[in-house]
Amino acid sequence: MRLRLPDRVIPFPRRPLIMGIVNVNDDSFSGDGTLDFDAAIEKAREQIRNGADVIDVGAESARTNRAAVTIDEEVRRFGGFLERWENSWSDLQPKDSEQIWPPILSANTWRPDVVREILPNKKVELLNDMSALPDETNARLCAEHGTALLIMHSVGEPKVPHLHQQWADVMKSMEEFFEEKIALALQAGIDRDALVLDPGIDFAKQRDDNLAVMRELSRLTRFDRPVLAPVSRKTVIGEVLGITDPKDRDAGTVACIAACMQGGANIFRVHDVAAAWQSVKVLHALNSKRG
């Protein structure tokens, strides 16, 4: 298996990738966003120094209790970060021999009008699309620019709460969803090797659904595509531990990383890159001794 990016290919199996989160907004659920572009770049630098293989930059919060920013504002925020992107890594050295270098830049957005504006920049290698791919538009735009596409499992519109969604069998429904969306992306012209799958933990899912997804994540390996596990500080961790503040859920996040790594996850999207990198490096070393 391999992940095809615009100008390079990442082969698997390998140690899972760590995706650091940089929020260029002022309403992140984890309280770590900023509208200062230089501060956002410094956040990316810190994560890269701590071992991040991917930086996932978002210009709009996914929180459902916050209004959407305008298209122009989201594009402006991305533009300010993209202009400075090389400043985040050009004078640094990889943390170890396995870190992807230079780091992959991922854009966390879903509105096609924004995607049309940022992909021609050519710095974005991966589109992290939380829209559940309702049509072929974003896949077609990625195909035009050679950008890899992350497809997230969910239902309905982003930024709209789906608190009453019920699943008779969440994993069976997810498998059917990915079969349909992969076919849609391929029809739009994207290379199958340019697809990443995201089970959408906490999106249109309740506590037991999220636990089932992490418990049975290995079922997604049938698609032979990298699987991203977005486990960092999720609501489900807070529900299990009785912890309200997301910033206090990092230990629980490490437990989810271990479980999802056992289930075949290839990428982890996290706030605390240092802890995730250490966890994944040790788990990979332990697993490599088997057999």
Image (spheres, rainbow, N blue to C red):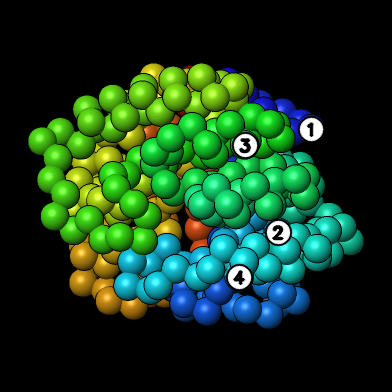
Badge 2 amino acid: Ile
User: In the rendered image of this protein, does residue 46 appear above or below residue 257?
Assistant: below
Q: Secondary structure at mark 1?
A: loop
- Residue contact between numbered discs 3 and 1, judged by CB atoms under 8 Å: no
Density class for disc 2 (Cα within 10 Å; few <14, some 14-19, many ≥20) is many
Disc on the earlier residue, 1 or 4: 1
Regarding residue 261, the answer to whether it shows in the image is no
Three-letter code, disc 3: Leu
| Residue 160 picture location, percent across and down | 30, 60
Tag 2 secondary structure: helix
Q: Earlier in the sequence, mark 2 or mark 3?
A: 2
Camera-nearest residue between 105 and 80: 80
Query: In terms of sequence position, does the residue under pointer 4 or pointer 2 come before the other?
Result: 2
Q: Amino acid at mark 4?
A: Glu
- Check disc 3 and report its element: helix, strand or loop: helix
| Lateral position of residue 183 relative to residue 46, left or right | left
Residue 73 shows which numbered tag? 4
Residue located beneath label 3 in the image: 141
Residue 161 appears at what percent x and percent y? 26, 61
Residue 77 location in percent, x, y?
65, 69
Circle 3 residues within 10 Å: few <14, some 14–19, many ≥20:
many
The N terminus lies in which quarter of the figure? top right
Mark 4 vs 3: CB contact within 8 A: no
* Residue 272, horizontal then vertical, whole percent: 53, 65
Residue at which label 1 appears: 7
Of the image marks 3 and 1, the number of the one nearer the N terminus: 1
In the image: residue 266, left or right of residue 256:
right
Can you tell which of label 3 and label 1 is closer to the viewer?
A: 3
Q: Nearer the viewer, mark 1 or mark 4?
A: 4
Circle nearer the viewer, 2 or 3: 3
Q: Which residue is mark 2?
A: 48
